[in-house]
Amino acid sequence: MSLALVGAGREAAVSPKLWRDDFPILGERVHGKPLAYLDNAATTQKPQAVIDALAGYYAHDNANVHRGVHTLSQRATDAYEAARAKVRGFINARQAEEIVFVRGATEAINLVAASFARPRLAPGDEIVLSAMEHHSNIVPWQLACAATGAVLKVVPIGDDGAFLPEAYEALLGPRTKLVAMTHLSNALGTVTPARWIVERAHAAGVPVLLDGAQAISHLAVDVGALGCDFYAFSGHKVFGPTGIGVLYGKAERLRSMVPYQGGGDMIRTVTFEESRFADIPYRFEAGTPNIAGAVGLGAALDYVSAVGMGAIAAHERELVAYATRELERIPGLRIVGTAKEKASIVSFTLEGVHPHDIGTIVDHAGVAIRAGHHCAMPVMQRFGIPGTARASFALYNTLDEVDALVAGVDEARRMFR
Amino acid sequence: MTAALRELYQDVVFDHARTPRNRRRPARSSHQAQGHNPLCGDKVTVHLDVADGVIRDAAFEGEGCAIATASASLMTEALKGKPVEEAERLLEGFHHMVTDPQAAAHPELGKLEVLAGVREFPVRVKCATLAWHTFHAALHGGHAPVSTEDGQ
């Protein structure tokens, strides 16, 4: 079925209209204008199904998990573990125990840096990452390097923001102990050849962590096919709640790792002489977890599966192509990040107008975009710019919203002329 | 364009953003400091030449948004020739003007009043105050760059 959206000279292959009704916040008005939410790379909005799952959990099932003998505790435990099973299915992990619930992608990466990397790193060892990483896939490794004497090796990117395969292969060496790579750049939209990256690293005997914070809501993520050792993502970027995220780790990797934090729920037995740690994944889930968050994330993944990643990707491809074409008609506008393989993000600069000013001006047209360095300062240094304005799309965005963005940016240009 | 936007981006602001005054590295300076707004990555360096308790010269270097650039430009114009004590009162008055929604008129601020509209844009207040924080740091020493995220 192909529903045309109203508008001159453009047809949408997929209509987001029905999906929009699932997201109550999209009915908000900003400065008297309909909200055009184009900041999905920062966080996504939540469908009613997720909001209901959170409320339903607290209204009917709330108790602590893995502890009580009473009925509610059992229900809460079942709901929490059902969410883990949903995550397993969504990313095609082999076993539910390979799914560790954490606060978000940041904590997932810090966990691997602390519990996997640090004990294995020696002075002069190398961690390979790319020049387009988010700060959360840089700083944890810098901390690990500072503690161990290991060093970072940075794969450069092309002028179009593309991943450079030859440069990557050249950096894989005898001292490489880990590859930590984005799956989809939050600042440029570049999609990396993750499967190939993993293959090359594994051929050199090097484990790989993929930062999937952006990719999770735009690409079909299959950790079995990718072959990665670790995959990190946040619930809130895939229509789930904030404060819940996932570290996927191959079971044998997770089993080889020391705990990240100590506390309740991560131990088998405790005496003052010694504690014995629980099996995976509980070894890495000290303390009462974000149970409602996990339940909400499960509902979000159900929602995405029902819509279908293929439909989402096709719709976003169209939005990116349309936004790119329309924005490029604005004099002085430059798209930053034009790699062939890209998704969901259009980053740009406008001659003579700082991204912050663009952000403020389009906000008054109801359009929410991000302006700044997008927690990827090295990317901005690479392109010699202080920051960009960034529109980032999700399944519920429309071509009309792109039009509102383009009109707002053009107004900024005219104001500053 | 909304009224609030017009209030923020006044002609004087555009003028100072396009053609900043005193954006240079002065030959003589007794005090200087660097300021940084980590939220957007903007950086500014403020140079002062103070003698006998009077700011003889004020200049800045750096690139930023229209609000940050205009604010730095207007600030250096306002500071030049002012006794240090008076300049510090100006800093207080400016900070009050851009942060307090109930703030009355500040005639002593003169031309700086064109930035009053920024108080309707809480996320942009730091753009307007970056140069002033840096000015304060320059006067009072301290070698670490100031950040809009320190304290307050």
Image: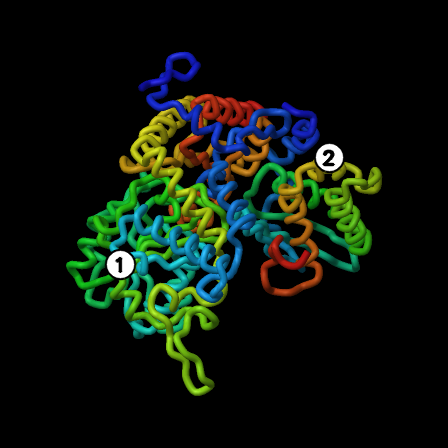
The residue under label 1 is A229
From the image, state whether disc 2 or disc 1 is nearer to you. 1
In the displayed structure, A67 sits above or below A338; it is: below
Amino acid on which the number 2 mark rests in the picture = Val
In this rendered view, identify the residue nearer to me: A176 or B32.
A176
Q: Quadrant of residue A176?
A: bottom left
Q: Amino acid at mark 1?
A: Asp
Q: Which residue is mark 2?
A: B114
> Residue, x 63% and y 28% (percent of image)?
A31
* Chain to which the residue tagged by mark 1 belongs: A
Q: Secondary structure at mark 2?
A: helix
Left or right of B90? Residue A33 is left
Q: Secondary structure at mark 1?
A: loop
- The numbered dot on residue B36 is none
Front-most of residues A15 and B56: A15
* Residue positioned 66% across, 25% down in the render: B2
Chain of the residue under label 2: B
Q: Where, by quadrant of the figure, is residue B122 drawn?
A: top right
How is this picture coloured?
rainbow
**Location of residue A104 in the rendering, given as x and y in whole percent from the top left corner:** 44, 54
